[in-house]
Image (spheres, grey):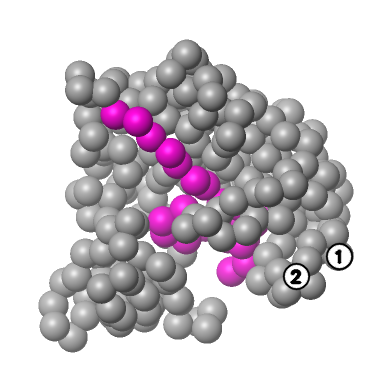
Amino acid sequence: MIIARSVMKRSEKLAIIAGYQTSGIGRRGRTWASPPGGLWFSLVLKTCIPASVVPFLSLAMSLSVVEVLRLKGLNAWIKWPNDIVVDGKKISGVLVDVKIDSDDVVHAIIGVGINVNFYLRDLPADLQDSVVTILEVLGYKLDILELLDEILREFDKYIAILERRKEQVIIEKVEEMLYGKGQKVVAICETGKFSGILKGIGQTGSLVLETENGIKEIDSFSLEKLLIESSK
């Protein structure tokens, strides 16, 4: 991400790949462990979309990752707003950084980390119960660059959809793969804690909960943590 920021305004599309990271950062500055054997990349992208569509960039990349992982035989789901889980355990995360020009030109860095060809023992002990790797699930290694190519091909399709202002296509596809949909969840936000049934994705990319006080939409910027009842 640091290198990507230095070329952000000079590149229209560029993928920067790391063999491993010494200071991987996740959402809200959380540490992201990234040993050798994972797919760690930042995609620098220039795209013509309005600011209102920016929240869908993370969802579009999450969709791309989930679809490719499912084709590999993994039980992958999107945990809103930016995680991918397999059998309820985190396998990937997405982090988006954007700069918006006045003429609806968006310069974005989409950072993606996927636990691929390493074992849980290669991670810090406090993470080993909550995450999983592709190698642990499938029992064999994947070609990292081939996996990257497959994900980027899927992502190109979704960027084209967003540039045509067809966000509803993204919403419908995310809802098909939304972890915890129909279950009771607890959303811990900057403004408080909200409990309810996870209904789906709103028209702005927000999370929609049905609470005892009615429908509540939560945006990704205010969310600190999302707990699914079955995974507490």
Query: Which quarter of the image is occupied by the N terminus?
Result: top right
Q: Residues within 10 Å of mark 1 (few under 14, many from 20)?
A: few
User: Is the stretch drawn in magenta largely helix, strand or loop?
Assistant: strand
Of the image marks 1 and 2, the number of the one nearer the N terminus: 1
Q: Given the current orientation, which residue lies at the most extreme left position? A: 214
Q: Which residues are magenta?
A: 73-100
Q: Is label 1 in contact with label 2 (beta carbons under 8 Å)? A: yes
Residue of label 2: 128
Say which quarter of the image contains residue 18. top right
Which residue is found at the position 59% from the left and 69% from the top?
A: 88
- Spatial CA span between label 1 and label 2: 7 Å
Residue 115 is inside the magenta segment? no
Q: Residues within 10 Å of mark 2 (few under 14, many from 20)?
A: some
Residue of label 1: 121
Q: Is 93 rendered above or below residue 105?
A: below
Is 120 left or right of 13, judged from the image as shown? right
Say which quarter of the image contains residue 97. top left
